[in-house]
Image: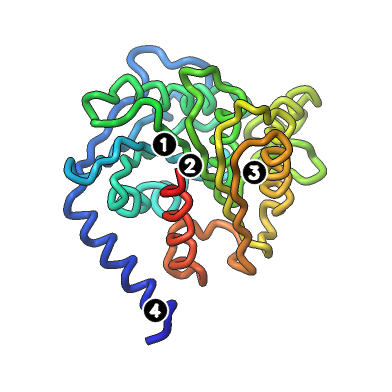
Amino acid sequence: MNARRILLALCMVVVSVAMSAQKSFDVNLWEGKMPGKSGDATDVPVLKVFLPAAKKATGRAVVICPGGGYEHLCMDYEGTEWAPFLNDMGIAAIVLKYRMPHGNPSVPVSDAEEAIRLVRRNAHTWHINATDVGIMGFSAGGHLASTVAVHAKADARPDFQVLFYPVITMMPSFTHIGSHDNLLGKDARKKDEQHYSNDMHVTRLTPRACVILADDDDVVQPANGVNYYTELYRHDVPASLFVYPNGGHGFGIRPSFRYHAEMLLTLRAWLNSF
Protein backbone atom coordinates (compact mmCIF):
# COMPACT_ATOMS: atom_id res chain seq x y z
CA MET A 1 0.00 0.00 0.00
CA ASN A 2 1.54 3.33 -1.06
CA ALA A 3 1.72 6.43 1.13
CA ARG A 4 -1.29 8.12 -0.48
CA ARG A 5 -3.53 5.10 0.14
CA ILE A 6 -2.38 4.92 3.74
CA LEU A 7 -3.18 8.60 4.25
CA LEU A 8 -6.60 8.16 2.65
CA ALA A 9 -7.36 5.13 4.82
CA LEU A 10 -6.43 7.05 7.96
CA CYS A 11 -8.66 9.95 6.92
CA MET A 12 -11.59 7.54 6.37
CA VAL A 13 -11.12 6.11 9.87
CA VAL A 14 -11.08 9.59 11.35
CA VAL A 15 -14.31 10.48 9.51
CA SER A 16 -16.14 7.33 10.63
CA VAL A 17 -15.19 7.86 14.28
CA ALA A 18 -16.17 11.53 14.22
CA MET A 19 -19.56 10.82 12.63
CA SER A 20 -20.53 8.65 15.59
CA ALA A 21 -19.74 11.38 18.11
CA GLN A 22 -21.14 14.54 16.56
CA LYS A 23 -24.39 16.24 17.55
CA SER A 24 -26.32 17.94 14.76
CA PHE A 25 -29.41 20.13 14.43
CA ASP A 26 -30.83 22.91 12.26
CA VAL A 27 -31.46 26.51 13.28
CA ASN A 28 -33.42 29.14 11.37
CA LEU A 29 -31.09 32.05 10.69
CA TRP A 30 -33.61 34.85 11.07
CA GLU A 31 -36.49 35.33 13.48
CA GLY A 32 -39.31 37.18 11.74
CA LYS A 33 -38.75 39.28 8.63
CA MET A 34 -35.55 38.67 6.69
CA PRO A 35 -33.51 41.69 5.52
CA GLY A 36 -33.19 42.33 1.81
CA LYS A 37 -35.31 41.03 -1.04
CA SER A 38 -34.11 38.07 -3.04
CA GLY A 39 -37.24 37.71 -5.14
CA ASP A 40 -37.80 34.16 -3.89
CA ALA A 41 -39.98 33.91 -0.78
CA THR A 42 -39.35 30.15 -0.56
CA ASP A 43 -35.58 30.61 -0.24
CA VAL A 44 -35.11 30.55 3.54
CA PRO A 45 -31.63 30.59 5.13
CA VAL A 46 -30.81 27.86 7.65
CA LEU A 47 -27.80 26.93 9.76
CA LYS A 48 -26.93 23.25 9.94
CA VAL A 49 -25.00 22.89 13.18
CA PHE A 50 -22.62 19.99 13.84
CA LEU A 51 -21.04 20.04 17.29
CA PRO A 52 -18.09 17.84 18.27
CA ALA A 53 -18.20 15.51 21.24
CA ALA A 54 -17.93 17.54 24.43
CA LYS A 55 -14.65 15.86 25.41
CA LYS A 56 -13.04 16.88 22.11
CA ALA A 57 -14.46 20.40 21.81
CA THR A 58 -11.76 23.08 21.56
CA GLY A 59 -14.17 26.01 21.46
CA ARG A 60 -13.36 26.76 17.84
CA ALA A 61 -16.14 27.01 15.23
CA VAL A 62 -16.26 27.41 11.46
CA VAL A 63 -19.19 28.79 9.46
CA ILE A 64 -19.15 27.06 6.06
CA CYS A 65 -20.40 28.79 2.89
CA PRO A 66 -20.88 26.26 0.06
CA GLY A 67 -20.34 27.33 -3.52
CA GLY A 68 -22.59 27.23 -6.55
CA GLY A 69 -22.06 30.45 -8.50
CA TYR A 70 -24.62 32.36 -6.42
CA GLU A 71 -27.22 30.28 -8.30
CA HIS A 72 -27.46 27.14 -6.18
CA LEU A 73 -25.57 25.55 -3.28
CA CYS A 74 -23.34 22.46 -3.18
CA MET A 75 -24.44 21.56 0.32
CA ASP A 76 -22.72 18.17 0.52
CA TYR A 77 -19.07 18.04 -0.58
CA GLU A 78 -18.66 21.78 0.05
CA GLY A 79 -20.81 21.76 3.16
CA THR A 80 -22.11 19.04 5.46
CA GLU A 81 -19.51 16.43 4.49
CA TRP A 82 -16.85 18.62 6.12
CA ALA A 83 -18.44 18.21 9.54
CA PRO A 84 -16.73 14.91 10.52
CA PHE A 85 -13.28 16.25 9.64
CA LEU A 86 -13.77 19.45 11.64
CA ASN A 87 -15.53 17.72 14.54
CA ASP A 88 -12.64 15.28 14.84
CA MET A 89 -10.43 18.33 15.44
CA GLY A 90 -12.83 19.50 18.14
CA ILE A 91 -14.18 22.24 15.85
CA ALA A 92 -17.88 22.99 15.53
CA ALA A 93 -19.01 22.98 11.88
CA ILE A 94 -21.88 25.30 11.03
CA VAL A 95 -23.03 24.99 7.42
CA LEU A 96 -24.87 28.02 6.11
CA LYS A 97 -27.66 27.59 3.57
CA TYR A 98 -27.69 31.20 2.45
CA ARG A 99 -30.18 32.87 0.11
CA MET A 100 -29.44 33.44 -3.56
CA PRO A 101 -28.98 37.12 -4.44
CA HIS A 102 -30.75 37.47 -7.81
CA GLY A 103 -28.79 40.69 -8.31
CA ASN A 104 -29.07 41.91 -4.71
CA PRO A 105 -25.70 41.26 -3.01
CA SER A 106 -26.94 42.39 0.40
CA VAL A 107 -29.06 39.21 0.63
CA PRO A 108 -26.31 36.55 0.97
CA VAL A 109 -23.96 38.98 2.70
CA SER A 110 -26.51 39.74 5.43
CA ASP A 111 -27.07 35.99 5.86
CA ALA A 112 -23.36 35.29 6.28
CA GLU A 113 -22.87 38.15 8.72
CA GLU A 114 -25.87 37.05 10.78
CA ALA A 115 -24.53 33.48 10.81
CA ILE A 116 -21.34 34.69 12.52
CA ARG A 117 -23.37 36.77 14.98
CA LEU A 118 -25.74 33.88 15.75
CA VAL A 119 -22.84 31.53 16.47
CA ARG A 120 -21.37 34.09 18.86
CA ARG A 121 -24.72 34.66 20.55
CA ASN A 122 -24.97 30.91 21.17
CA ALA A 123 -21.33 30.49 22.10
CA HIS A 124 -21.99 29.52 25.72
CA THR A 125 -24.75 27.01 24.88
CA TRP A 126 -22.78 25.42 22.05
CA HIS A 127 -19.48 25.41 24.01
CA ILE A 128 -17.84 27.77 21.52
CA ASN A 129 -15.27 30.48 22.10
CA ALA A 130 -16.84 33.65 20.67
CA THR A 131 -13.38 34.96 19.73
CA ASP A 132 -12.47 31.86 17.70
CA VAL A 133 -15.18 31.75 15.03
CA GLY A 134 -13.89 31.37 11.48
CA ILE A 135 -15.47 31.20 8.04
CA MET A 136 -14.84 28.74 5.22
CA GLY A 137 -16.01 29.26 1.65
CA PHE A 138 -15.85 27.47 -1.69
CA SER A 139 -15.88 29.18 -5.09
CA ALA A 140 -18.73 31.74 -4.91
CA GLY A 141 -19.00 30.79 -1.24
CA GLY A 142 -15.36 31.81 -1.01
CA HIS A 143 -16.34 35.19 -2.39
CA LEU A 144 -19.06 35.46 0.23
CA ALA A 145 -16.66 34.43 3.00
CA SER A 146 -13.99 36.91 1.91
CA THR A 147 -16.62 39.65 1.53
CA VAL A 148 -17.56 39.23 5.18
CA ALA A 149 -13.87 39.05 6.12
CA VAL A 150 -13.01 42.39 4.52
CA HIS A 151 -16.25 44.36 4.94
CA ALA A 152 -18.08 43.21 8.08
CA LYS A 153 -18.11 45.20 11.29
CA ALA A 154 -16.38 43.69 14.30
CA ASP A 155 -19.40 41.76 15.62
CA ALA A 156 -19.73 39.86 12.32
CA ARG A 157 -16.09 39.73 11.26
CA PRO A 158 -14.68 36.18 11.42
CA ASP A 159 -11.50 35.45 13.34
CA PHE A 160 -9.98 33.50 10.44
CA GLN A 161 -10.90 32.45 6.92
CA VAL A 162 -10.37 29.35 4.77
CA LEU A 163 -11.02 29.83 1.07
CA PHE A 164 -11.15 27.05 -1.51
CA TYR A 165 -10.71 28.05 -5.17
CA PRO A 166 -12.45 31.34 -4.32
CA VAL A 167 -14.04 33.92 -6.54
CA ILE A 168 -12.44 37.11 -5.22
CA THR A 169 -12.84 39.81 -7.83
CA MET A 170 -15.96 41.13 -9.54
CA MET A 171 -13.95 42.96 -12.20
CA PRO A 172 -15.02 41.59 -15.62
CA SER A 173 -11.46 40.87 -16.76
CA PHE A 174 -11.00 37.80 -14.55
CA THR A 175 -14.08 37.29 -12.42
CA HIS A 176 -16.29 34.22 -12.70
CA ILE A 177 -18.94 35.77 -14.89
CA GLY A 178 -21.79 33.58 -13.61
CA SER A 179 -21.12 34.60 -10.02
CA HIS A 180 -20.77 38.22 -11.11
CA ASP A 181 -24.09 38.28 -12.96
CA ASN A 182 -26.02 36.42 -10.25
CA LEU A 183 -24.62 38.62 -7.48
CA LEU A 184 -24.62 42.06 -9.10
CA GLY A 185 -26.61 41.68 -12.31
CA LYS A 186 -25.37 41.70 -15.89
CA ASP A 187 -25.40 45.51 -15.99
CA ALA A 188 -23.55 46.02 -12.70
CA ARG A 189 -22.20 49.44 -11.87
CA LYS A 190 -18.43 49.74 -11.78
CA LYS A 191 -18.47 51.00 -8.20
CA ASP A 192 -20.34 47.87 -7.13
CA GLU A 193 -17.85 45.69 -8.99
CA GLN A 194 -15.05 47.46 -7.14
CA HIS A 195 -16.81 47.22 -3.78
CA TYR A 196 -17.17 43.44 -4.13
CA SER A 197 -13.66 42.91 -5.48
CA ASN A 198 -12.34 41.79 -2.14
CA ASP A 199 -8.64 41.97 -2.94
CA MET A 200 -9.12 45.74 -3.14
CA HIS A 201 -10.33 45.97 0.46
CA VAL A 202 -7.75 44.03 2.46
CA THR A 203 -6.44 45.92 5.50
CA ARG A 204 -4.33 45.06 8.52
CA LEU A 205 -7.59 44.17 10.30
CA THR A 206 -8.49 41.46 7.78
CA PRO A 207 -8.44 38.06 9.53
CA ARG A 208 -5.71 35.51 8.83
CA ALA A 209 -6.37 33.28 5.86
CA CYS A 210 -5.69 29.95 4.20
CA VAL A 211 -6.25 29.83 0.42
CA ILE A 212 -6.40 26.45 -1.36
CA LEU A 213 -6.75 25.93 -5.12
CA ALA A 214 -5.55 23.96 -8.13
CA ASP A 215 -3.24 25.33 -10.81
CA ASP A 216 -5.42 24.00 -13.63
CA ASP A 217 -8.70 25.56 -12.44
CA ASP A 218 -10.41 26.65 -15.65
CA VAL A 219 -13.64 27.84 -14.00
CA VAL A 220 -12.35 30.43 -11.51
CA GLN A 221 -8.98 31.78 -12.57
CA PRO A 222 -6.31 31.03 -9.92
CA ALA A 223 -5.36 34.71 -10.07
CA ASN A 224 -8.40 35.36 -7.85
CA GLY A 225 -6.93 33.50 -4.88
CA VAL A 226 -3.33 34.43 -5.65
CA ASN A 227 -4.08 38.16 -5.81
CA TYR A 228 -5.99 37.95 -2.53
CA TYR A 229 -3.03 36.21 -0.87
CA THR A 230 -0.69 38.87 -2.26
CA GLU A 231 -2.77 41.65 -0.72
CA LEU A 232 -2.90 39.83 2.61
CA TYR A 233 0.88 39.48 2.54
CA ARG A 234 1.30 43.15 1.58
CA HIS A 235 -0.82 44.20 4.58
CA ASP A 236 1.02 41.94 7.03
CA VAL A 237 -1.96 39.62 7.52
CA PRO A 238 -0.86 36.04 8.36
CA ALA A 239 -1.79 33.94 5.35
CA SER A 240 -0.93 30.70 3.57
CA LEU A 241 -1.46 29.78 -0.09
CA PHE A 242 -1.54 26.16 -1.26
CA VAL A 243 -1.68 25.51 -5.01
CA TYR A 244 -1.98 21.88 -6.11
CA PRO A 245 -0.65 20.86 -9.55
CA ASN A 246 -4.07 19.77 -10.80
CA GLY A 247 -7.57 19.03 -9.63
CA GLY A 248 -9.56 21.62 -11.49
CA HIS A 249 -12.45 23.36 -9.79
CA GLY A 250 -14.92 22.17 -7.18
CA PHE A 251 -13.04 19.29 -5.59
CA GLY A 252 -14.19 20.15 -2.08
CA ILE A 253 -13.81 17.16 0.21
CA ARG A 254 -14.31 14.61 -2.57
CA PRO A 255 -11.97 11.62 -2.14
CA SER A 256 -11.55 11.56 -5.93
CA PHE A 257 -9.38 14.69 -5.70
CA ARG A 258 -5.88 13.36 -6.32
CA TYR A 259 -4.41 15.30 -3.39
CA HIS A 260 -7.35 14.75 -1.05
CA ALA A 261 -5.38 13.18 1.81
CA GLU A 262 -2.52 15.65 1.54
CA MET A 263 -4.97 18.56 1.44
CA LEU A 264 -6.70 17.43 4.63
CA LEU A 265 -3.37 17.04 6.41
CA THR A 266 -2.27 20.48 5.20
CA LEU A 267 -5.51 22.11 6.36
CA ARG A 268 -5.31 20.30 9.70
CA ALA A 269 -1.77 21.60 10.18
CA TRP A 270 -2.80 25.15 9.28
CA LEU A 271 -5.75 25.10 11.70
CA ASN A 272 -3.44 23.81 14.43
CA SER A 273 -0.90 26.57 13.77
CA PHE A 274 -2.67 29.25 15.79
Residue wearing tag 2: 136
Residue type (three-letter) at the residue carrying disc 4: Arg
Please tell me which residue is depicted at 46% across the width and 48% down the height of the picture: 273
Q: Is residue 63 visible?
A: yes
Residue wearing tag 3: 167
Say left or right for 271 vs 53.
right
Residue type (three-letter) at the residue carrying disc 2: Met
The secondary element bearing badge 3 is classed as loop
Decide: marks 4, 3 in contact (CB < 8 A)?
Answer: no
Residue wearing tag 1: 63
Percent position of residue 259, x then y: 51, 69
Residue wearing tag 4: 5
Mark pair 3, 2: CA separation: 13 Å
Q: What quarter of the picture does the C terminus occupy?
A: top left
Q: Residues within 10 Å of mark 3 (few under 14, many from 20)?
A: many
Q: Residues within 10 Å of mark 4 (few under 14, many from 20)?
A: few
Q: Nearer the viewer's eye, disc 1 or disc 3?
A: 1
The earlier-in-sequence mark between 4 and 3 is 4
Say left or right for 249 vs 84.
right
Percent position of residue 248, x then y: 61, 63
Q: Nearer the viewer's eye, disc 3 or disc 2?
A: 2
Please tell me which residue is depicted at 63% across the width and 32% down the height of the picture: 183
Please tell me which residue is depicted at 58% across the width and 66% down the height of the picture: 247
The secondary element bearing badge 1 is classed as strand
Residue type (three-letter) at the residue carrying disc 1: Val
Residue type (three-letter) at the residue carrying disc 3: Val
